[in-house]
Amino acid sequence: MSLIKNIKRTYLLPLTPALLVAALLWGCKSGENYVRPDLELPAAFKTLPSDQPDSTDAFTDNIAEIAWESFFEDTSLVKLIDKGLNNNLYLKQIRKESDIANEAFKQTKANFFPQLNTIFEKRNDRYSQNSTTRESVKYYQGKDTPNQWYVARAHNIAAVQSSWEIDVWGKLRRQKEANRAQFQRREAITKAVETDLVAEIATAYYKLLMLKEQQQVATYNLRLNDSTLSIVKLQFRAGEVSSLAITQTESQKMISASLVPQIERELEIQKNKLNELLGEYPNESINVNKGLGDTRLLSDIYVGLPLELIKNRPDVNAAELALVEANAQVGVSQAMRYPALSLSAQVGYDAISFSNVLNPGSLFGVFIGSLTQPIFQNRRLKTRYKISLAERDIAELAFREKVIQAVSEISNGLVTIEKLEEEYELAEQRLINAREAVKESYLLFSSGYATYLEVINAQSNALESELYMVDVKMQMLVANIELYRNLGGGWN
């Protein structure tokens, strides 16, 4: 007990001033706390559809805040998206990377605690009698040393060792802040991948519906060509038309017929792409038996304010967190240039003879408080600090660029939807006229008031108008999906 008191008096009391200084400096923190830069965001997006609700409407939700299960009403699509979010292999990889970042964050939190090690050591050192490393200890006095060129000395230790770096300048706190931002950034990236995946699955699904509808249009038009060819053949037998009429009509039929295998090929490729997004090999589990039909489009679009992008859009949030991390790393590199205060201690038993290891007289204690100030490190510390400043500037520029990109994408999406709606109305009117022309051409052709060429042209225009309208409707659906994604919807 007296030995322990002596250890406290000899080693701990001199450390008291250092501990007081550490306590006073604990509030210091190198570097500057993060403050979001002034992005000078516009009050609203540049272009809005004519039916855009007023932003002050308390009952209107930003579509980015609508869960994807509610945004997409097609139950088949909802099941596919749910399956993709659970099975997509790339998304699983991204989630694992987020787990890795979380482990690194946990490590920085543990850095505030002392390290603790146990030591059990048994040594036998042999020295030459003429060596300068040989120690002259009382253990050898009065004893006959071996009549040879070396002597032996035993050494046995059982101890507990601890070391602790005092976070005087906030280096560990800044490192923790950086790793927290890194972990949160990985989570934001995961959300961005989820958003992309939801949009890609929905787009692939609607493309399947489009191709199915185009297949139906092509098949129907092929039947019309068959009917026209039958009439032309009857007229040829009656001597009303030449063989050229049959040849041209057959050529038109072949053009229509060639569309069917083209569309079937695209259907299979699109199914395989969708299966890939679902994390599966190509299979026959995806069966599409309907076209776009009456697929609902958004009737009311409210995109919120540009400022909401930072909260709702994961990739914008990730860009800001990268800036937060870079700002914290500046504090870390700055603290590396200041004095480092560390405490270490070792308590245990040390004896030459193994039988005396646990003897109270073998108890020893070592307590060390060290203050280390870097002076000349071949410019490494200054270089690291300068690089961290430049990296913070780069991160801020990347954040600003991402925000501008996001605002532009949403403005482009709004214009696209508005103009596609106008284009769709014209496509509908064009299709009505084309179908009417087909009817009239058949009636006139049957009565001998129109030529087969007029019938062929009418059918060709009708086919083109049908396919065009389906394509425009698909573009409208994709534009809605892209707007939903660009606003940051699909991850919540």
Image (cartoon, rainbow, N blue to C red):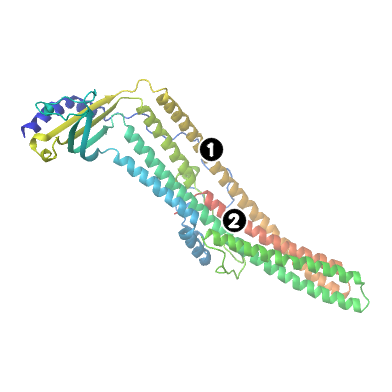
Q: Earlier in the sequence, mark 1 or mark 2?
A: 1
Residue shown at 61% from the left, 52% from the top: 417
| Residue under the point 55% across and 59% down | 276
Label at residue 401: 1
Question: Residue 152 at x, y = what percent?
Answer: 19, 32
Instruction: Give coordinates of residue 133: x percent, y percent.
Output: 23, 25
Q: Quadrant of the C terminus?
A: bottom left
Point 43% across, 52% down: residue: 95
Q: Sort mark 2 into few (<14), some (14-19) or many (20+) by Cα contacts within 10 Å.
A: many
Residue type highlighted by circle 2: Val
The quarter of the picture where residue 463 lies is bottom right
What percent of the width, then of the height, locates residue 383?
44, 25
Work out whether residue 362 or residue 29 is closer to the camera in this orientation and state it. 362
Q: Amino acid at mark 1?
A: Glu
* Viewer can see residue 57: no
Which residue is the extreme one toward the right?
A: 239
Is 461 situated above or below 345? below
Q: Which mark is residue 409?
A: none
Q: Position of residue 321 (x, y in %)?
A: 43, 40
Q: Secondary structure at mark 2?
A: helix
Say if 360 sits above or below 269 in the image: above
Name the residue tied to disc 2: 478
Split into 4 quadrants, where in the image is the N terminus? top left
Q: Which residue sits at x=13%, y=37%?
A: 353
